[in-house]
Image: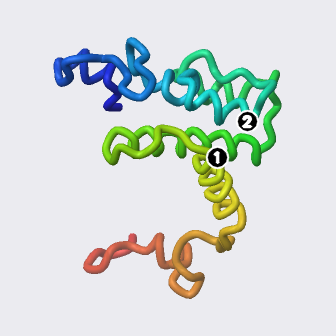
């Protein structure tokens, strides 16, 4: 991902300093979890839960037995991380406020929309368009069955 740290390593940026909080190096983990702006949102939602130590094993951290997150909590964490990343991009590209209470509100709204979105139980073509096993196992046209 195009963090200042990664861009600097590729010689695409003159500095790896994070422009939002002046941290010496903008890593994705820093902005999503340890930057004061992200930590504010994290601490409002989960004051007794420390964020993951690094981004790489994030899915392992979410799935850790010591946390025993519900599906809803996992979804909320993912939506907060996503909205935090979007807030970072809006600050970088549109010069908006780096973090605001609306980031948490947007994460909550996205989670609500996700969980209340009507879903069909089946995925695929309607049953009237399905091919029966007999039709599927027949030889291609122009060939003869043995």
**Residue located at (65% from left, 59% from top):** 109
Residue 126 lies, with reference to residue 50, above or below; the image says: below
Disc 1 residue crowd, few under 14, some 14–19, many 20+, Cα 10 Å: many
124 vs 3: above or below: below
Q: Are marks 2 and 1 in contact (CB under 8 Å)?
A: yes
Q: Which mark is residue 44?
A: 2
Give the quadrant of the C terminus.
Answer: bottom left
| x then y, percent, for residue 40 | 64, 31
Residue furthest out toward the bottom: 128
59 or 17: nearer the viewer: 17
Question: Residue 98 at what x, y percent from top left?
Answer: 47, 38
Tell me which colouring the rendered structure shows.
rainbow
Is residue 81 left or right of 27 when viewed as pictured? right
Count of all numbered marks drawn on residues in the image: 2
Nearest the viewer among 26 and 117 is: 26
Query: Which residue occupies 63% across, 45% down?
Result: 101
Q: Position of residue 38 (x, y in %)?
A: 57, 31
* As drawn, 82 above or below 30: below
Which callout, 2 or 1, points at the residue further toward the start of the chain?
A: 2
Spatial distance from mark 2 to mark 1, Cα to Cα?
Answer: 9 Å
**Mark 2 secondary-structure assignment:** helix
Q: Nearer the viewer, residue 58 or 110?
A: 110
The residue lying at 75 percent from left, 42 percent from top is 73
Residue in the image at 30% along x and 79% along y = 141
- SS of the residue under disc 1: helix
Check the picture and name the quadrant holding the N terminus. Answer: top left
Instruction: Pick the residue in front: 1 or 5.
Output: 5
Q: Is residue 127 above or below residue 64?
A: below
Mark 2 Cα shell of 10 Å, populated few (<14), some (14-19), many (≥20)? few
User: Dot 1 corresponds to which residue?
Assistant: 104
């Amino acid at each position: 991902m195009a963090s200042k740290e990664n861009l600097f390593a590729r010689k695409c940026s003159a500095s790896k300093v994070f422009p939002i909080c002046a941290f010496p190096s903008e890593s994705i983990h820093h902005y999503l979890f340890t930057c004061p702006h992200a930590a504010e949102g994290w601490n409002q939602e989960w004051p007794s839960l420390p964020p993951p130590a690094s981004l790489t094993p994030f899915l392992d951290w979410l799935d850790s037995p010591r946390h025993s997150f519900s599906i809803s909590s996992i979804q909320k964490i993912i939506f907060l991380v996503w909205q935090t990343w979007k807030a970072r991009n809006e600050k970088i590209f549109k010069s908006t406020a780096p973090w605001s209470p609306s980031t948490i509100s947007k994460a909550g709204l996205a989670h609500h929309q996700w969980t209340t979105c009507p879903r069909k139980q089946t995925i695929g073509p309607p049953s009237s368009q399905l091919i029966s096993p007999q039709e599927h196992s027949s030889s291609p046209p122009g060939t003869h069955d043995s």
